[in-house]
Amino acid sequence: MSQEEKKEPVEANAEVVSEEKPATLVDAIFDIGLAWAEFGVGQGKRALETSAKTLEKVAQQLSDLQQKLRKDAA
């Protein structure tokens, strides 16, 4: 084999490896982004659920106060 024949496969492999690295890096960054988005959406959901429960409790207390005021007025 000549030197040129030996270089071609090495250069071709080097190009393939260099093309795979950015794709792998992009995939890794994309996966990290998705993980953070999933985490953020989950935190938002929990915050809304907690707010809803708090508002229900406040609404019940206001209803109880309204009934008490009606009884006192009668």
Image (spheres, rainbow, N blue to C red):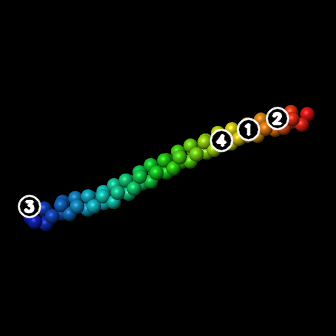
Image quadrant where one finds the N terminus: bottom left
Residue 67 shows which numbered tag? 2
Q: Report, in whole angstroms, how far the alpha carbon at label 3 lies from the one at label 4.
A: 79 Å
Mark 1–mark 2 CB contact (< 8 Å) = no
- Furthest-bottom residue in view? 4
The one of 30 and 35 positioned closer to us in this rendering? 35
| 40 in relation to 54, above or below | below
Q: Name the front one of labels 4 and 2.
A: 2
The one of 48 and 36 positioned closer to us in this rendering? 48
Label 3 environment density (alpha carbons within 10 Å; few <14, some 14–19, many ≥20): few
Q: Mark 4 points at which residue?
A: 54
Q: Name the front one of labels 1 and 3.
A: 1
Q: Mark 3 points at which residue?
A: 1
Q: Report, in whole angstroms, how far the alpha carbon at label 1 lies from the one at label 2.
A: 10 Å
SS at mark 1 in the image: helix
Residue shown at 44% from the left, 49% from the top: 35
Place of residue 41 in the rendered image (x, y in percent of width and height, measured from the top left):
53, 48
Three-letter amino acid code at the position of disc 1 = Gln
Place of residue 42 in the rendered image (x, y in percent of width and height, measured from the top left):
52, 45
